[in-house]
Amino acid sequence: MILYGASGHAKVIIDILIDNKINIDGLIDDNNQIEELLDYPVYHCLTKFNSVKNKSYIVSIGNNRIRKEIVAKLGDVKFGTVVHSSVILSPFVSLGVGVVVMHGSIINSSSKIGNHVIINSRAVVEHDCLVGDYVHISPGAILCGNVKLEEGVWVGAGATIKQGVTIGKWSVIGAGAVVISDVPSNVVVAGVPSKLIKVHDV
Ligand SMILES: CC(C)(COP(=O)(O)OP(=O)(O)OC[C@H]1O[C@@H](n2cnc3c(N)ncnc32)[C@H](O)[C@@H]1OP(=O)(O)O)[C@@H](O)C(=O)NCCC(=O)NCCS
């Protein structure tokens, strides 16, 4: 496995790869000042991995827009999906490619998780949720049942989203928010209950 992005987020993914007994071939980062992460080599050029057989990638960057850009840059490569052994995962869940499911999280029955999604530590995705591509559900956040997150949504740490609510594309839910009704695309909401605090410049 090759990780693209030598960040703090990548350190946690390395733990998951070790837990899954997956070989780590190395990392790539655009910042050529970074030479290693947790003793794994960090390279600055994809060709470094030309000789690796059956390679697959995970983009180890928490920012949803940057993760999407890097996935596009990598083009037609194979992406892995990894789940820490402490996760409770219903057999009726579908997971896309490039997904990372971190320590202690729960994904319940009939939820569908898109591509390049991060389900961070101890997050809860209840039954029948639809999670779009490039979503990040931060540590301890809770999606009650039948929640829909469209592409690129970032749910802040410890936020709770009430059952049946839809969050529009690329919107951000502040840490600790309680979201009780639908949120449009490209906005930031925060607070209990959550209120609009910003509209993105997109
Ligand atoms: C919501 C968030 C994205 C807003 O960031 P921002 O756009 O830089 O906003 P600002 O810090 O300029 O704050 C704007 C206003 O919203 C308020 N605010 C910001 N975050 C808030 C939050 N989580 N809950 C309640 N109010 C919040 C600020 O107090 C400020 O209010 P004011 O205008 O009355 O002073 C950010 O604060 C946040 O919660 N990020 C999530 C962090 C997280 O979960 N990290 C996990 C990483 S894995």
Image (cartoon, rainbow, N blue to C red):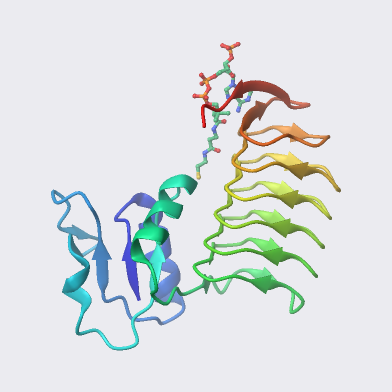
- Residue in the image at 78% along x and 26% along y: 193
Q: How many numbered discs sit on the rendered protein?
A: 0
Across and down, in percent, residue 1 comes to 35, 76
Residue 196 drawn above or below residue 23 = above
Residue 165, percent from left and from top: 82, 43
At 40% from the left and 59% from the top, the residue drawn is: 72
Residue 41 is at least partly visible in this image: no
Which residue: 51% across, 27% down? 201
Residue 42 horizontal side relative to residue 98, left or right: left
Residue 7 in view, yes or no: yes
Q: Residue furthest top?
A: 197
Q: Residue at x 74, y 79 (%)?
A: 91
**Relative to 55, is 79 above or below?**
above
Q: Residue furthest bottom?
A: 53
Determine which quarter of the picture holds residue 92.
bottom right
Query: Is residue 9 left or right of 44 when viewed as pictured?
Result: right
Of residues 157 and 135, the one drawn nearer to the viewer in this rendering:
135
Residue 52: image location, x then y, percent: 24, 84
Nearer to me, 53 or 143: 53
Horizontal arrangement in the rendering, residue 48 relative to residue 192 (left or right): left
Q: Is residue 38 above or below residue 159?
A: below
* Residue 88 x, y percent position in the rendering: 68, 70
Q: Is residue 127 left or right of residue 113?
A: right
Ligand 1's image quarter is: top right
Task: Identify the image quadrant of residue 195.
Answer: top right
